[in-house]
C-alpha cells in the first residue's frame, strides 16, 4: 500500500517518548550497599514494593477515573460511541462462544478463544484509522470485527477449508498468523515501507506474552527502533503462554523491554476498553507523526483455555480465574453505562436479540461450509511427487476407510 503523505515525516524524538510511560516497574534490582551494612534490597523485595504503572480510566466497579496524560484521547467520546464499544464487546464474545461450541460439536478442528480479552481488542481496534494496517495473530477476533471482517470469514481456516477467508487488502487486516511472533517482523517491514512511501498511516502488530520471548519479536523491536518505523506493538499479556505463567518468561514487566531497544513502553489495564482506546490512539498518533515505535502491554486475562485442545485446570486454580472474572471488561463498561445513564433496559434487551441473531448466522454459515479435503495435505509437498508421501497417503486412506460401515457410508 502506498499513500501520499500530506507532510514530511518528523525526525525521531528521544527514546524516552512520552514522560512516565516506562515507569520503574517490578523485578528490578534495588539499592545494594553491601559494605556499609545497609540492608540489601533483593529482587523479590523490589517486586513487592514497586508495582508497575498501569493506565486505567475505568475501574472494575465501573467508576471513571481521571488520567492527566490520556484523558484527552477519549475526551470527546459520546454516549452513542460508548454504547458502540459495549456492543462490539458483547457481539464479539457471542461470536467467540458460538465458535467454541461449534468446535466442541465437531464443526471446527480448533478454536482459539478471546474470552476475557474483549476490551484489549475492541479498544485498540477502534483506535485504528481505515488506512492503518493490522497484523494479527490467531486470536484477534475482536480486532477483525473492528476492521469490518465478517466473523464467518474467520472460521474457514479453523474448519480446514481455506488458508484465510478474506482479502487482507480489503480491510487492511492481514491473515491470521499461526507461527508465533513472526507477524511482528512482517509489521515492521510493512511499516518501514509505508514510511519510505511518505504515508502518514501507521501499523499495529498483535502478539501475546509468550510470543514476547521469541527471537522474531526482538528482531522486530531492533529494526523498528533503528529505522524509526511507524509501528505499534500491542502485547496482550493474558498471564499464560499456554501453561507457562508470565513470571517464568520475564524478570521485568513486559512493557519495560522497550527501554532496551530505545522506544517507549506502557502498561494499560487490558480489561478497560477506554484505557486501551486512549493509549492505542496516543501510540498510533505518535507513529504517524514520525516518532517511531511503541510497545503497549495490555494487562488482561485469558478466562478460557489457550485453544480448545487445552485444559487450563491442569495448571491454574479456580481462585485466579474468579479474581479476574470480577474484573470482567464487559460488566465493567455496563456498570459505567448504567450509572451514567447512557443505556437502559431497552438497549440491553435489543442487544441480546442481536447477539442471538449473530450466533444463529455464524452457526448456519459454518454448517453450510464444505467438509475439508482430508487429502489436500499430501498435495504439492513435492513438485514431482515422492514415494514416502505416496506411502503416507495410502496409509491415511486406509485409516479413513476403516471408519466406513458395511454399506460404504
Image: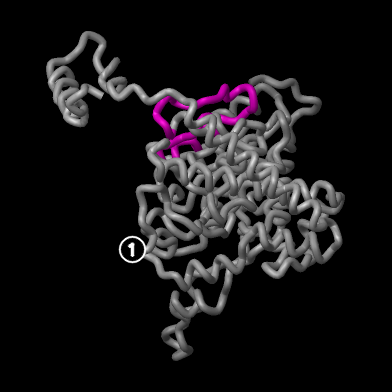
Q: Which one is in front, 241 or 343? A: 343
Above-or-below relation of 268 to 204: below
Q: Which one is in front, 354 or 52? A: 354
Residue sitting at 74 percent across and 64 percent down? 335
Residue 277 % position (x, y): 71, 50
Q: Main secondary structure of the magenta part?
A: loop
Residue 228 in view (yes/no) = no
Is residue 101 rendered to the left or right of residue 224? left
Which segment did they paint magenta? Answer: 158-187
Element assignment for label 1: helix
Residue sitting at 73 percent across and 66 percent down? 62
**In the displayed image of the protein, which residue is found farthest to the front?**
407
Q: Which residue is mark 1?
A: 314
Above-or-below relation of 3 to 360: above
Above-or-below relation of 239 to 284: below
Residue sitting at 54 percent across and 45 percent down? 96
**In the displayed image of the protein, which residue is found farthest to the top?**
384
Q: Quadrant of the N terminus?
A: top right
- Label 1: few (<14), some or many (≥20) within 10 Å? few
Residue 43 % position (x, y): 44, 75
Amino acid at each position: 500500500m502506498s499513500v501520499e503523505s500530506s507532510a514530511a515525516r518528523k525526525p525521531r524524538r528521544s527514546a524516552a517518548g512520552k514522560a512516565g510511560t516506562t515507569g520503574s516497574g517490578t523485578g528490578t534490582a534495588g539499592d545494594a550497599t553491601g559494605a556499609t551494612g545497609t540492608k540489601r534490597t533483593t529482587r523479590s523485595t523490589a517486586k513487592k514494593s514497586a508495582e508497575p504503572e498501569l493506565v486505567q480510566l475505568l475501574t472494575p466497579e465501573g467508576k471513571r477515573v481521571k488520567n492527566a496524560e490520556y484523558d484527552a484521547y477519549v475526551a470527546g467520546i459520546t454516549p452513542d460511541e460508548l454504547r458502540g464499544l459495549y456492543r462490539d464487546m458483547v457481539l464479539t464474545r457471542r461470536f467467540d462462544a458460538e465458535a467454541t461450541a461449534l468446535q466442541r460439536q465437531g464443526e471446527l478442528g480448533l478454536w482459539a478463544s478471546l474470552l476475557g480479552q474483549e476490551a484489549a481488542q475492541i479498544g485498540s481496534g477502534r483506535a485504528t484509522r481505515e488506512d492503518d494496517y493490522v497484523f494479527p495473530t490467531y486470536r484477534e477476533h475482536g480486532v477483525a470485527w473492528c476492521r469490518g471482517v465478517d466473523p464467518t470469514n474467520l472460521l474457514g481456516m479453523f474448519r480446514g477449508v481455506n488458508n484465510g477467508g478474506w482479502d487482507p487488502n480489503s480491510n487492511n487486516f492481514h491473515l491470521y498468523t499461526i507461527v508465533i511472533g513472526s507477524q511482528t517482523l512482517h509489521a515492521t517491514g510493512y511499516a518501514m515501507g509505508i514510511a519510505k512511501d511518505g504515508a502518514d498511516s501507521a501499523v499495529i502488530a498483535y502478539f501475546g506474552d509468550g510470543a514476547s520471548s521469541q527471537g522474531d519479536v526482538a528482531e522486530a523491536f531492533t529494526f523498528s527502533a533503528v529505522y524509526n518505523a511507524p509501528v505499534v506493538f500491542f502485547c496482550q499479556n493474558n498471564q499464560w503462554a499456554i501453561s507457562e505463567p508470565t513470571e517464568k518468561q520475564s524478570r521485568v514487566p513486559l512493557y519495560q523491554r522497550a527501554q532496551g531497544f530505545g522506544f517507549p513502553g506502557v502498561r494499560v489495564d487490558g480489561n478497560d476498553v477506554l484505557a486501551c482506546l486512549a493509549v492505542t490512539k496516543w501510540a498510533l498518533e505518535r507513529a504517524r507523526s514520525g516518532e517511531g515505535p511503541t510497545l503497549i502491554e495490555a494487562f488482561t486475562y485469558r478466562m478460557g483455555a489457550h485453544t480448545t485442545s487445552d485444559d487450563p485446570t491442569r495448571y491454574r486454580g479456580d481462585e485466579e480465574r474468579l479474581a479476574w472474572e470480577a474484573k470482567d471488561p464487559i460488566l465493567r463498561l455496563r456498570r459505567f453505562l448504567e450509572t451514567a445513564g447512557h443505556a437502559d433496559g431497552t438497549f440491553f434487551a435489543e442487544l441480546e436479540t442481536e447477539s442471538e441473531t449473530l450466533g444463529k448466522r455464524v452457526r448456519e454459515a459454518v454448517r453450510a461450509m464444505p467438509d475439508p479435503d482430508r487429502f489436500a495435505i499430501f498435495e504439492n509437498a513435492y513438485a514431482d511427487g515422492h514415494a514416502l508421501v505416496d506411502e503416507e497417503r495410502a496409509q491415511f486412506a486406509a485409516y479413513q476407510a476403516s471408519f466406513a460401515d458395511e454399506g460404504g457410508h
